[in-house]
Every structure is written in C-alpha cells, then in structure tokens.
Image: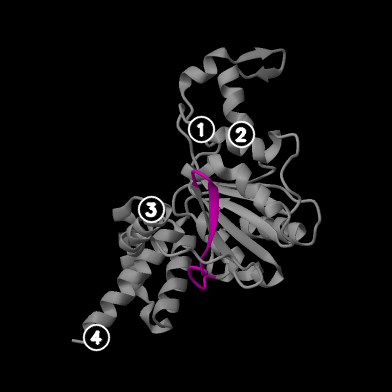
Amino acid sequence: MDAELTRRLSRLLDHVEHWLPPVPEEVDWERDVAALWQRHALGGRLLPVPPRDALTLDDLLGIERQKLALIDNTRAFLQKLPANHALLWGSRGSGKSSLIRALLNSLAPEGLRLVQVDRHDLSGLPTLVEQLRHQPQRFVVYCDDLSFEGHDDAYKALKSVLDGALTGPPENVLLYATSNRRHLLPESLSDNEASQLVGDELHHGDAVEEKISLSDRFGLWLGFYPFNQDTYLEACCHWVTQLGSASDWGAEARAEAVRFATLRGGRSGRGAWQFASHWVGRRRLHEGR
C-alpha cells in the first residue's frame, strides 16, 4: 500500500510541477544591493532585484538641503555612527522616491543595502528585521508611499520595530519611508476637539497623540515642496539635455514646458521628467519622418 501511495503521489507531482513558480533566487548580499520583501503565511522571503536605473544625486535638482541631510545620515549609519530613521514627506512628484533610488546608486559601493517593503506587508516587518539582524551588511528598509487609514492596524508593527519593542531595532537596520502625509495617518477636524491649552502649553487629545506618535518615531523629517518656476525650468533643461541634447532646449522648449506644467496644475521634478520625455520623444519622432 505504501508503494502504491508513493507512486500515485509521484504521478500527481509530475502533473502539477510545471504549474509551480520557479524557486526564487537566494539573495547574495555581497553581490546584490537591493531586494524586495514578500510576506507569506510562513513568514516571508527576500527577492533580489537589480537597481531600477542609473539615477544619480546630481540628477535631482531643487532639493539640495534634503539631499545633504539624507546623505549625511546614511553615511553616519554606514560608518556605525549614530543615525536616525527618516521620513520623507511632502507634495507628489517632488523627488522623495527618486532620492532613495539615487542614494542607493551612490552609496552601494560604500556598503549600503536596500530592502523595499510594501505597505501591505508591514505586518511581517518584525520577521524581516530579525533576518537582517545577524547579517554583516548594513540595511535601509524602505517603504514607499506610506500612509494608513484610520481603521488600518498595520502601522502598529511599524511603530513596534521603530521604537516600541523591548529589543529595539537592530543596530544594522534603519527605516526610511516616503509619504504625502506628514503624520502618515489621516487627520480630521474632530481629532482636535479634545486638545486643550493649559497655560502656554498645547495638550493634544488622545486621537492626535496616537497619530503623531508614529511619525514622531522617525528622528529625521525631510519636507518636500512644489517647485517654483525657475527650479522647474532648470529641471526641465537638465532632463531635456540628458534625454536628448543641449540643442533641444531653447525658447520654444521653455514656453512648452510652462504650458505643460500649467495644464497639469503644478510644477515638480516628476513633471520636468515627463515634459522632457514628451518633448524629446516628439522631436525625434518628427525628425525621422
């Protein structure tokens, strides 16, 4: 009977084996500089990924203060000096995610390794950091476009890893997050109803304290703001020259860049890149006709 059962199981596996996904490649942190964390029922796994592009810190214009602050913080971390978890917050398209990518491209030779975690996989964050705790490399765990709704409890795992657990975060792990919200959680007018002024001190209500307590665990806050027109046009010029040539930028391109931003209702680094792609692509298309 055992032999028959073994034979039948073997036949079943032969039939379903080609439907199974390939065994994921193991991360080699001597070779790989970035990975994605995927949570599953038994914990989670790391999937190595190549850098998305060759974006450099010099490509990011209009955010010099933010660049310098994050570079200094990360280099201190890589040299085993005190450093802070970082929250990059502010307007859409202003360079928050691009700064993280450029930081990896620039500092990977100095030992930086990046692990990206999706917001929906944050409940597995404690498992991830425990896996990284005993590695010799130094890691930035990164969550892009982080925000939570009022009923979402996933932020509690993040709070615990940042500061709340008895063991604390591993010495070789920092958390960086980007968000459009400064406090990561939605804020409503009713939250402030329980706040009160005692003498000259403002005492927030419990709802506000709960929301601030998450973002307050990030020691480095970097705000990103919409570009003014001069900075936007400088970024447009940079990307038009990068994607095409210096001859592609002139009075006509400048006027079209202003119209492009007006139609989109805002100026940003992302908008400058999109304009350059539109402008250079269209010019090359018509030149070939």
Q: How is the image coloured?
A: one colour
Decide: is 201 above or below 253: above
Q: Which residue is mark 4?
A: 287
**Name of the residue lying farthest toward the front:** 1
Q: Secondary structure at mark 2?
A: helix
Mark pair 3, 4: CA separation: 69 Å
Residue that badge 3 annotates: 5
Label total for image: 4
Q: Is residue 51 magenta?
A: yes
Residue 185, numbered circle:
1
At 34% across and 63% down in the image, what residue appears? Answer: 14
Q: Position of residue 9 (x, y in %)?
A: 37, 56
Judge depth for marks 2 and 4 and give the one in front.
2
Which of disc 1 and disc 4 is earlier in sequence? 1
| Real-space CA distance between mark 3 and mark 1, rounded to the nearest whole angstrom | 55 Å
Find numbered disc 1 in the image and state the secondary structure of the residue it sits on: loop
Mark 2 vs 4, N-terminal side: 2
SS for tag 4?
Answer: helix
For mark 3, give the secondary structure.
helix
Residue 38 horizontal/vertical position (percent) = 50, 52
The residue at 22%/82% (across/down) is 286
How packed is label 3: few (under 14 Cα within 10 Å), some, or many (20 or more)?
Answer: few
Residue bearing mark 2: 214
Do the residues under discs 3 and 4 have CB atoms within 8 angstroms? no
Q: Give the magenta part as a residue range.
A: 40-55
